[in-house]
Each structure stands twice: as C-alpha cells, then as structure tokens.
Amino acid sequence: MSAPRRPAYLEALATFCADTSFAALPPDVVARARWILADCLPVIAAGMQVPEMKALVAAHLAGNETGEATVFGAGRRASALDAALLNGTAGTWLELDEGNLFAKGHPGIQVVPAAVAVAQETGASGRDLLRAVALGYEVSSRIHRAANVKLAVHPHGTYGVIGAALAVGLLRGFDRAQLLELVNVSATMGMATSRQTLLDGATVRNIYTGHSGYMGIMAARLVACGFTGEVDSVAAIYGKVLSDTFEPERVVAGLGSEWLITKSYFKLHPTGRYVHSAIDALEDLLAKLPGGRLAPDSIERLDVRAYALAAMLREKAVRTSFGARFSVPFALASIVVRGRSGLASFDDAAVADPQIQALAQRVEMHEEPSFTARYPAEQPVVLSATLRDGTVHEGACTVTKGEPTRPHTEAELGAKFRELGEPIWGAATTAALLEGLGAVETIGDFRRFTRGLAF
C-alpha cells in the first residue's frame, strides 16, 4: 500500500526549504536574520540572571554531561537539547525579545536557541546558521499567520516548535522528504499554552519558548530515527485544535517573494509588545512638555484609548516584576515616576514603590473599536493626562517604534546589545561577539567562533 500523498502546500514548503540556498536569500532577509540572531543572545544572557533561571540551570544540569552548546549568561555548556530549553526559557523573561505582529507572536526566540545550539554542536558555518534561522522563522510564521488561533492560546510553544525543527533539520542536512516529514511531526508537538499567564504574571509562561527549542530538536531526532507524522498535521492542529479556521493557500501565497521575517520588530522596552504602543504615546506627550517630565502628584488621571490587545493589558494590582511587564497602567506610572523605561522601572523595587502603585490606580484603559480595526498594520493609542489643575495634555502613537515602517537604528540595537551584555560578559567579549555576529555569514565554524569567546 502506497503512502498517502501530502497536501500541495506542505510539498511546496518542503521544496522551498530544501531548494533555497543561502545565496538565494534576499539581502534584506539576511540582514534581518543577522540582527534577530544578534538580538537574541544578550537578551537570553540577561534573562539568565534572574533567581529562578539560576535555580533552573543548577537543577537541570546537575549531573548532566557537558556539551558544545553555550548556556548564555550562565557560564555553562550543555547538550543542544538542554541549552535550547534553558536559553529559550531565559529569552522571554525580561520581555526584550524580537517579535512579529504579522506572524502573531515571537518567532525568533523560538527558533534561534535551537539553531544556535545545533550549530555549535555540529560546527556549522555562519551561512548555514543564518539560512536555517531565516527559513525556520519564515515557514513557521506563515503557518501561524494562516490560522485564527484562539485568543486564549499563548503563541509561544506552539508554531515555534515547527520553526525550531526546520532550522535543526536544515543544519543537519535533511533532504526534501525528511523536511516534509519534519513539518508534520513537529506540528503536533506544541503545548497547550495559556495567554492568561500574562494577565496573572505567571512565570511558567517562559518555559513555552524553551519548549519550542527543545521539542524542535527532538522532532528532528524522531524523523532521523524513522518516526512519521500525520498526512497533514498542520491542518489538524491549526484548523481543528488551536483554531477553527486555517487557510493552507495563505501559507504559500507569495512564498519566496514576500518574507514575513522582514516585517519583524525589535524591542527597547522590557514589556509586552502592546504596552510599547502606550509607552510611545506617553513619550510623545512628554516630549511636548518643558523638561520632558510630568510630576506624578500633579496627575488627576491618565486615560488610554487603544486597540484591543493593548486595552486588554489593564491590570492595576501588579504584585510581581514579571506581571509589571504586562500592565499598561503600571508601565505608564513607573515611567512617569522613574523617568525612563529601563529594567529598573519593572523590577521588584518598582513594584513595591507606593507612588508608582498609586498612580497606576489612576490609569483608565478603553478599547477604541476603530483602532482595533486598524491593527496590525497600525497600532494606534491616544493618551490623555488630566492634571489636578484641569490642564489636559495628549500624546499619541500610530505605529509602534521598532516596527519595520518605524525601525530602530542599528546604533540603538547595538546600544541595547552592549547594555545587556557588558554586565555579564565584560566589554571586550561583548564587543567581539557583536562584531562577529554582525558578519556571521563569514564565520566558517560557529562552534570555533563561540569557543574563542570568554563566556
């Protein structure tokens, strides 16, 4: 009995991955993949410094043999499986990882940890690493875009398994048939994730991205050992389980000419993405004031009109540093009080600050349906500050900073890299890593390159 024929869109995805060489990648795709790779590593290392991650590293690696893969920020090496799990988990802790509104999630931090770990394990070239990241990112993003995944499902730990698996398969030299099988095997290996974790400030949510990398590597191992998937696992999961609507034709529409990876964004604020739109509106408001400051005690209330996903982040009773990253009221209050939006504005001391907590109670969130209709092409927010003397100041955001139509500069991204990396690795190692990743396609052996750095 012959094997059932796979759907045409899955055949097309496998062919696309197998046949697209590094040389065939458009320059803007290479440039974006290079920055996604570079952005992830110091974000991971900084996240690795929180007490929970330090405890997890110690517990998870206790008694385990070391490997070639770096556990960034921990001064440890581990197997590719373990490094992908730990790095992926740390990478979302501080909410500074890259994302993509059109892919409806954060593809980079789900693909990069597995790809880097396997590149170190195999001694892959920088060109092969960039190709694997770009194609794994692109295909998984297209699959997620083509589904109307339930809002209750957190996007981490779902389609990211597919992206990580494809990146690993490409690095391990899988042929077209194996890549096709890999898509189907990995599609069923995601988690039942909950978006409520954001609203509750539940840090279990961070394991979701670690799961993507770990299970992506495992999926490739299963296929290499002869395991098989359904005829169309993607449609089964994204058309029946996580979503009731899936459009296969949309997965391959413009494949090779339209690249979702070029539509990604980078973060400079350590908060959930939708909070950034409100922060931009606040910055617009403050820029119009003398000295760029607003005295907290002078504020009667702050009214925020926003698109639905931003308006949803309305929690005022913030109790943890992680929860603070998903509260628009807390973010606005903390930035007004602290004067900036750095890591210190969302740490435990900020959460314990009575002035910040009091101001957060005076922030009112409102969904504006016309703003929701303009999302994701635009992310409109209007912020009004009513002062105790009756004066009203207003600020607005139309497109959030960091989006491809309003990008951060390379200087800003480099400054973020150094700010996160230098306290952990020192200035010299941080500079060498940034320089190397800036020309990663010239690296002949990524394992040798990272071995030469004082991690």
Image (cartoon, helix red, strand yellow):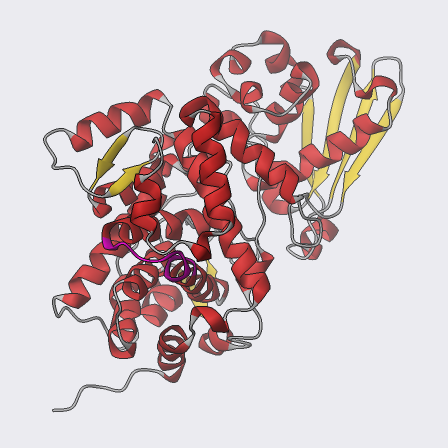
In percent of width and height, residue 253 lies at 53, 77
Q: Where, quadrant-wise, is the N terminus in this rendering?
A: bottom left
Q: Relative to residue 144, is residue 314 drawn left or right?
A: right
Is 359 located above or below residue 370 in the figure?
A: above
Q: Is residue 92 visible?
A: no
Measured as percent of width and height from the top left, residue 180 is found at 29, 75
Task: Answer above or below: position of 149 versus 95.
Answer: below
> Which residue is depicted at the point 59% across and 45% down?
309
Instruction: Tell me the residue at 27%/52% (across/down).
Output: 118
Classified by dominant secondary structure, the portion drawn in magenta counts as: helix
Q: Nearer the viewer, residue 33 or 328?
A: 33
Quadrant of the rendered structure where residue 332 is?
Answer: top right
Could you say where residue 432 lies in the image, as x and y percent from the top left? 46, 37
The residue that appears at 41% across and 27% down in the rendered structure is: 425
Q: Is residue 62 magenta?
A: no
| Nearer to me, 177 or 173 | 173
Rendering coords of residue 161 (x, y %): 32, 56
Residue 10 vs residue 252: left or right? left
How many marks on residues?
Answer: 0
> Measured along the vertical axis of the image, is residue 143 above or below residue 400?
below
Q: Can residue 251 be seen here?
A: yes
**Residue at 73% over, 38% down:** 305
What's drawn in magenta, residue-wise? 122-130
- In the picture, which quadrant includes the C terminus? top left
